[in-house]
Image (spheres, grey):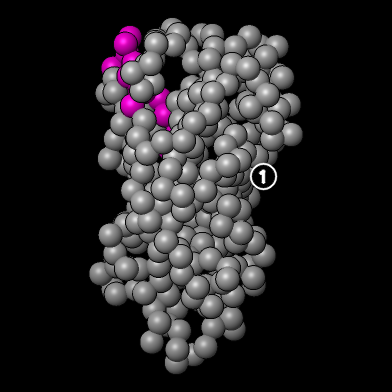
Amino acid sequence: MIRIHFIVNPIAGHGHASFTKEDLQPYFIRGIHELTVKISEYKKHATELTKSSILENANIIVACGGDGTINEVASCLIGTNIALGILPMGSGNGLASNLKIPKKRRKALEIIRNKHIEHMDVGKINGRYFFSNTGVGFDASLIKHYESSEKRTLLGYIRACATTFRDINKNTPLSIVVDEEVPMANPFIILISNSNEMGYKLSLTPKASLQDGLLDVLVIKNISRIKMLWLGFLILIRKVHWLKESRSFQTKNVHIKCNQSDFFDTQVDGEHKRIDTNELTISLVEKSLFVLTPQ
Ligand SMILES: Nc1ncnc2c1ncn2[C@@H]1O[C@H](COP(=O)(O)OP(=O)(O)OP(=O)(O)O)[C@@H](O)[C@H]1O
């Protein structure tokens, strides 16, 4: 018997895509697949539900939501032999897109039923796992605004972008050192990515791979507002490297030190996290997660 547990975030994406065990049963075989559906009722509940599913000897645990839900579920699966399944139900669905898992429920369920398993790399920032990307600067502020907005949609994302753009110079000036280099005043963005997609088909690190044993880093220095608009355009056409203030590199470890503050506002897989320290250590844990992918 293959025990498959579905952990559903009912507010992910547009917030009305929940389902029951009976809805799923036709896609599986009675007597071979034993299905369980659990609904997350609050932030971090998916983590508790996953931990209980591990104790209930689940063979596959499926994160049903976006990158935030995947993070809560998959973080519990590192070091186990339980495979992660994904039903993309979020707004951006960055990791699912990178793994070529379609949004169409029937097709995504077929991938789970077919049980084709691959290893993928996982990132770690000060003890927390990330699967897609993490960062400080514009993206972290953007996520902070996005989370406080009512709408977790593309429109909500664009509005949060506008607010972040408006407030960009109101924050305390920071001097940051990335990997022992010359301190940088107020970098616009430092993005560390495991995946080649941020969601909504956007990418700042198009060469990133989930299996290359490397993190893809993009650092953009403090730039003028006009340049920010230019950058926005370059992101849309996937040519960020045309911006001369940008630098991309691949590495296994990144250290970021901040001289003026004892905390960082970061985003981890699209969720805002305040990390209380003046030093971030970001590393890669190679091939540490089993994930179900299309063949
Ligand atoms: N019942 C709930 N009520 C409120 N928040 C919840 C609930 N269940 C889960 N959450 C939280 O919802 C947040 C958003 O989830 P998720 O990232 O999966 O969706 P999304 O933001 O729509 O998708 P994406 O990250 O792909 O854009 C997560 O931080 C998760 O902890």
Residue at 39% over, 33% down: 273
Residues 92 and 233: in front is: 233
Determine which quarter of the picture holds residue 74. bottom left
Is 223 located above or below residue 70 in the figure?
above
Give whichever of 262, 13 is nearer the camera.
Answer: 262
Magenta residues, start to end: 255-269
Q: Amino acid at mark 1?
A: Lys
**Hey, which quadrant is residue 136 in on the image?**
top left
Q: Is mark 1 within 8 Å of ligand 1?
A: no
> What is the quadrant of the C terminus in the image?
bottom right
Q: Which residue is mark 1?
A: 201
Q: Report the front residue among 211 and 225.
A: 211
Q: Residue at x 64, y 61 (%)?
A: 102
**Quarter of the image where the N terminus is located:** bottom left
The reply to whether the magenta stretch includes residue 15 is: no
Q: Position of residue 214 (x, y in %)?
A: 43, 43
Q: Position of residue 12 (x, y in %)?
A: 55, 51
| Number of marks in picture | 1
Q: Secondary structure at mark 1?
A: loop
Q: Main secondary structure of the magenta part?
A: strand
